[in-house]
Amino acid sequence: MSTSHAHDSSAADAAPALDIDRIRADFPVLARSVHGKPLVYLDNANTSQKPLAVIEATDHFYRTSNANVARAVHALGAEATDAYEATRDKLARFVNAPSRDEIIFTSGTTQATNLVAYSFALPRLVPGDTILVTQMEHHANIVPWQLVCARAGAKLKVAPISQSGELLVDRFVELLTADVKLACVTHVSNVLGTINPIARLARECRRRGIPLLVDGSQAAPHLPIDVRALGCDFYALTGHKMFGPTGTGMLWARREHLEAMPPFFGGGEMIREVRFEGTTFADPPHKFEAGTPNVAGFVGLGAAIDYMDSVGLAAMAAREKALLEHANTALRSVPGLRVIGEAADKVAVISFLIDGVHAHDLATLLDLEGIAVRSGHHCAHPLMQFYGVAATLRASLAFYNTHDEIDALVAAIGRVRKLLA
Ligand SMILES: Cc1ncc(COP(=O)(O)O)c(C=O)c1O
């Protein structure tokens, strides 16, 4: 894997090798069998597996400290609030946010982009305005913008990509005209693995006074994230792809935006005072966090960040880089296999097609061999339309995968092809 930060690649190269047996022992599910075969889990971009540290942190929370947060003065209420709020500090450090108060807990990236759509974009849009996205976005970074554009009489504009799956940066910059009220770009493509040059895009957006939202869902498990260095306005991520529990995620936003944005969800915990004549709201981040959150989930997300820290992002990156190189070579040895997405700067996510074989058929037969890959449109219809395909197969790797698992995938593809022929 290579990264968008020059220093990261060299750090990754210099990182000590991981003790992979010990790492795999941290993930109980990796030891199971599927259809009588050892599980080969290559669907990490869909959701990652969870280490014992995360499983135990959520279990421990429910066993010892379960209470609602920010409400009760009793001991359990205080412990729950401390454990939950500690994750805000960890996330702030994880993305190098200037302040913990700029971290809004969400259920994932989808809730984060919708929050920005309704609370930031919609009040600013007038007929004739546009929101700029790219051809490689996930539906979570397309549909919320379409919904608010439809309400406001605004339109989406789409920055094109090359056949190799790289954003055409010059075209993106040309499209940054005065009608653009927000630009929305994924940090890493969930289908292609492409790493977008966010710092450069952010500079161009800022020069023109256009806010930039970055979908970091697929970056968070692979790259160090530094929102200050990136220079964007909003950064969204989802916990379940970075070894944390489902139903957890984050929106980071510049303080000035959070102060200007009205609340989107109303209810308990987001208020200062409620009167029937009118309600005043809490300061960010609580203004955007109505209702009882996924407390145990966020405790688990904190444990996931600690776990990633303990393994070391550089060591994870170095291992993924080696896995990607091996997978590239091994998969390309398969006759008739075409890789979709050949960006120079990419993470260990490989989409591919095989002549004469339907992606779903292949994925179904691979499952019988214990191999979990994803087939389908990957919530990226417009990207599939660009490549003129209905579906791809996707092998997405995590640092706990092995060369042997990649070889098992390639061998199983060979067997399955013979069967289908
Ligand atoms: C690039 C990208 N953006 C957004 C999402 C949505 O994440 P979530 O469903 O956790 O909100 C995903 C998940 O597949 C993704 O890969």
Image (cartoon, grey):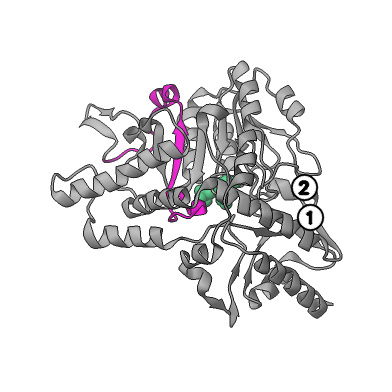
Above or below — where is 93 with respect to 418? above
At which x and y percent is residue 225? 53, 38
Q: Nearer the viewer, residue 3 or 409?
A: 3
| Mark 2 C-beta closer than 8 Å to ligand 1 | no
- Total numbered badges shown on the rendered structure: 2
At which x and y percent is residue 48? 53, 58
Quarter occupied by the C terminus: bottom right
**Residue, x 51% and y 31% (percent of image)?**
227
Q: Amino acid at mark 1?
A: Val
Apparent side of residue 418 relative to residue 293 in the rendered image (left or right): right
Q: Nearer the viewer, residue 75 or 327?
A: 327
Apparent side of residue 232 relative to residue 360 in the rendered image (left or right): left
Residue carrying label 2: 342
Above or below — where is 8 with respect to 327? above
The local crowd at label 1, few if under 14, some if 14 to 19, many if 20 or more residues have their Cα within 10 Å, is some
**Residue, x 36% and y 31% (percent of image)?**
101
Toward the left, the furthest residue is 74
Q: Nearer the viewer, residue 339 or 304?
A: 304
- The residue range painted magenta reads 239-268
Apparent side of residue 225 relative to residue 288 in the rendered image (left or right): right
**Residue, x 70% and y 49% (percent of image)?**
192
Q: Amino acid at mark 2?
A: Glu
Residue carrying label 1: 339
**Residue, x 51% and y 23% (percent of image)?**
124
SS for dot 1: strand
Any magenta on residue 130? no
For the question of whether residue 396 can be seen, the reply is yes
Apparent side of residue 313 relative to residue 259 in the rendered image (left or right): right
Any magenta on residue 262? yes
Contact, CB < 8 Å: mark 2 with mark 1? Answer: yes
Disc 2 to disc 1, C-alpha distance: 7 Å
Q: Please tell me in which quadrant of the rendered image residue 58 appears.
A: bottom left
